[in-house]
Image: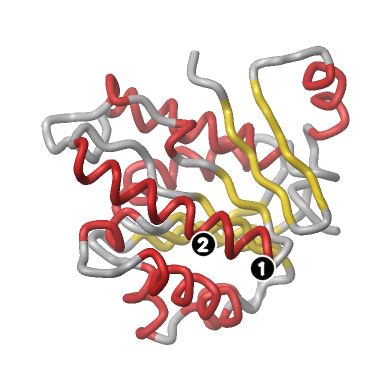
Amino acid sequence: MKWLRPGVRVALIGDSQMQGMGQRLARLLQQHGVSVPLVEARSGWSTRGYLQSGDIPALTRGVDVAVIELGGNDAAGNISPEAHALDVASLLHQVAAAQVVWVGPSVSSDPAFERRRQQMREAQQRVLSRAGKPWISGASLTRVADLNDSGVHFTPVGYDRFAAGLAEALLRLPGGIGWESWVGPLAAGGAAAVALGAAGWYFTRRRR
C-alpha cells in the first residue's frame, strides 16, 4: 500500500474548504518530500457536481494518492444521505489514482446545517468503510471557534489549523511517514484515535 512517503504524488481535490487550506496543506506535505502536483478547489461544488462533470479521472490520473474533501455542499442541497452515499461510491469508481482518501465535512455553527453535515459524514463513512478506503473526519480537525462570520468557512488561523491537522492525519496513514512513530503513543492513550479493520480505516482527532 503506497501512502504518503517521500516521492509519492498527491492530488488535493475539494470545494471552498480546500480553496482555503489547499496551498497550506500542500506546503506541509512538501516539507516531508511528498509531491503535490495538483490542488483543485472549486468553491460551491458538491460531490454530485464533480461526479456529473466527469473531471475526476483526468484530475486523478498520474498521481499515487487522491485526497478528496467534499460533502459540505451536498449537505446544503436537497440530497438525502442515501443519495449522497451513492454519489460517493460512484465518484470512488472514477478515481484513477492507486489510492484515495476522503475527508468529510468540517464543522458548522448552524445547528440545523450541522445535523445535515453529520448525516453526510455518516453516509461517507459507511461507503468508505465498505470500500476499504480511509475516511478522515473534517469535523474533528476543525473548531467552531475558528469559523468566520459565514458560519462554515474559517479564519486564516482556522485554515492553518485545519491544514496542520489534516497533514498530520494523512502522514499517519498506515505505512506512511508518521505511522511507525504514532503507534506507540496511540497504544498509550494519545491525543488521537484510530480504528482499523477489514472493512476500512478512519481517523478522528480529539479536539484540544
Q: Which residue is drawn at 48% across and 59% down?
A: 123
Distance in Å between CA atoms under marks 1 and 2 = 9 Å
Front in this rendered view, residue 91 or 154: 91
Residue sitting at the far left:
149
Q: Residues within 10 Å of mark 2 (few under 14, many from 20)?
A: some
Total marks in image: 2
Relative to 180, 202 lies left or right: left
The way the protein has been coloured in the rendering is secondary structure
- Residue located at (81% from left, 49% from top): 197
Image quarter in which the N terminus is found:
bottom right
* Helix, strand or loop at mark 1: loop
Q: Residue 38 carries which label?
A: 2
Could you tell me the amino acid type at mark 2? Leu
Answer whether labels 1 and 2 touch (C-beta < 8 Å). Answer: yes
Q: Residues within 10 Å of mark 1 (few under 14, many from 20)?
A: some
> Does residue 65 sit above or below 24 in this rendering?
below
x then y, percent, for residue 67: 56, 57
Of callouts 1 and 2, the N-terminal one = 2
Is 96 in front, or is 131?
131
Mark 1: amino acid? Val
Residue at image position (30%, 63%) is 74
In this rendering, position of residue 183 left or right of residue 151: right
Residue at 11% x, 31% y is 149
Above or below, 154 relative to 34: above
Q: Where is residue 128 in the image (x, y as percent from the top left)?
A: 62, 61
Residue labelled with disc 1: 63
Mark 2 falls on what kind of element? strand
Give x and y (percent) for residue 176. Answer: 80, 43
Residue 130 coordinates in the image, percent (x, y): 68, 65
Which of the 4 image quadrants contains residue 159? top left
Horizontal side of 141 relative to 18 (left or right) equals: right
Q: Which mark is residue 93?
A: none
